[in-house]
Image (spheres, rainbow, N blue to C red):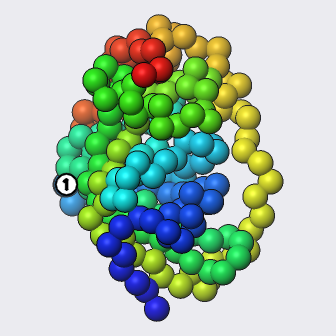
Amino acid sequence: MGKTYDRIDGRLREFIEAQPLFFTATAPLADTGTINLSPKGLTGSFAVLDELTVGYLDFAGSNAETIAHLRENGRITLMWCAFQGPPNIVRVHGRGEPVFRDDPRWGELVSRFPDIDDSLHGLRAIIVVHAELIRDSCGYAVPYLSYDEDRDLHARRFAREDDESLSAYFEKKDHIASSIDGLPGLPLPLPPMPNASV
């Protein structure tokens, strides 16, 4: 029932790009470490960068587990489910890295997300994932769910922050500069937001 793909293109790419929600999973190397699983949304915050590379925008939040795990070991799995139409689950297993605001690749990467106003969400990193294994499976037990619209709460909360206040917000949180397990997380103070145009 499952199929392995050599690249992200055609119907597979169309399916991934059409989903309003996906999930990311990461873990530290230590066998006692905390596994992290996160839902990701906001229309326009995900992009297929090429046939073997995807990326998504990492916005302000109360922890930085994905960033910490990627900085330690790079392992990540992304998953999409069909909540409408034919049943399907797609997983991209690969190696990821957080690209921070002061990285020379920032301008080119952020330009790949033209539908997101990066001043509204406390954008702190771009997660780039290089696919090593791309598979789908049946998804027969995934329920039908309807998508109504994106919530506007994240933008309303973080649009009022500037670089200095956002950095201060992060510094007050227990699991931003370091993970739950004490791994290095988001480097602070947060570099200023560079000009997004290229």
Residue at (71%, 25%) from the top-left corner?
A: 156
Judged from this view, the residue extending furthest toward the bottom is 1
Residue 35 is situated, as x and y percent measured from the top left of the image, at: 35, 56
* Position above or below: 121 against 22: above
Q: In the visual, does 164 lie left or right of 131?
A: right
Query: Between 102 and 31, which is closer to the camera in this rendering?
Result: 102
Can you see residue 146?
yes
Residue shown at 31% from the left, 19% from the top: 102
Residue 170: image location, x then y, percent: 44, 21
| Above or below for 169 versus 25 | above
Tally of numbered discs: 1
Give the amino acid type for the residue marked by disc 1 in the picture.
Answer: Leu
Mark 1 lies on residue: 29
Displayed quadrant of residue 124: top left
- Residue ID at (32%, 33%): 99
Q: Indicate left or right for 108 with 144 as reference.
A: left
Question: Residue at 53% of width from left, 85% of height from top?
Answer: 138
Under tag 1, what secondary structure? loop
Where is residue 75 shown, x and y percent of the image?
26, 55
Image coords of residue 46 (percent x, y) = 51, 47
Quarter of the image containing the C terminus?
top left
Q: How busy is the neighbourhood of tag 1: few (under 14 within 10 Å), some, or many (20 plus)? A: few
Q: Residue furthest top?
A: 164
Q: Is residue 33 visible?
A: no
Out of 198 and 164, give the one closest to the viewer.
Answer: 198
